[in-house]
Image: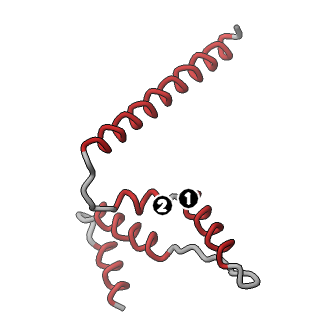
Amino acid sequence: MNSLSRNLSCSIRSSMHTNCLKHLHYQQQQWRGIRVKVLNGNLERALTFLQRKMQSSGIERLIKREQTHHIKNSEKRVLARKNLERKIRSQDLARKLKAILIKKVRGL
């Protein structure tokens, strides 16, 4: 009942609209779960299947992002370099696709 009243109070208040959406999104993330069946008592296979499901759904990234332990400076540099490389690769791909689309539109 308490969560229902919170949801209703969020929908009534228009000034807190974005905060309400974040709250509802968090609840949806919390309710969403991954279930894996253990067939014939094969727990190892079920665990590997669970790990694959977690990677594909993005839960693993959310868990890593929420970690609050200390990150060494060397790890920060490595992560920053990887993010920069990913950004550059994405920009290059976007540039190539744009050039291809322009050629296609112009009929070249």
Q: Earlier in the sequence, mark 1 or mark 2?
A: 1
- Image position, residue 23 (x, y; %): 34, 69
The answer to whether residue 33 is above or below residue 17 is below
Instruction: Check disc 2 and report the residue beneath it.
Output: 60
Quarter of the C terminus within the rendering: top right
For image coordinates 36% across by 65% down, the residue present is 21
Q: Is residue 90 left or right of residue 9?
A: right
What count of labels does the image hold? 2
Mark 1–mark 2 contact, CB under 8 Å?
A: yes
Mark 1, residue position: 55
**Callout 1: SS:** helix
Comparing 76 with 84, the one in front is 76
45 or 30: which is nearer to us? 45
| Looking at the image, residue 43 lies above or below residue 98 | below
| Residue 22, placed above or below residue 12 | above
Determine the residue positioned at 24% across, 56% down. 70
Q: Secondary structure at mark 2?
A: helix
Q: Residue at x 40, y 74 (%)?
A: 27
Residue at 61% from the left image edge and 61% from the top image edge? 52
- At label 2, which amino acid type do we have? Glu
Horizontal side, residue 101 vs residue 63: left or right: right
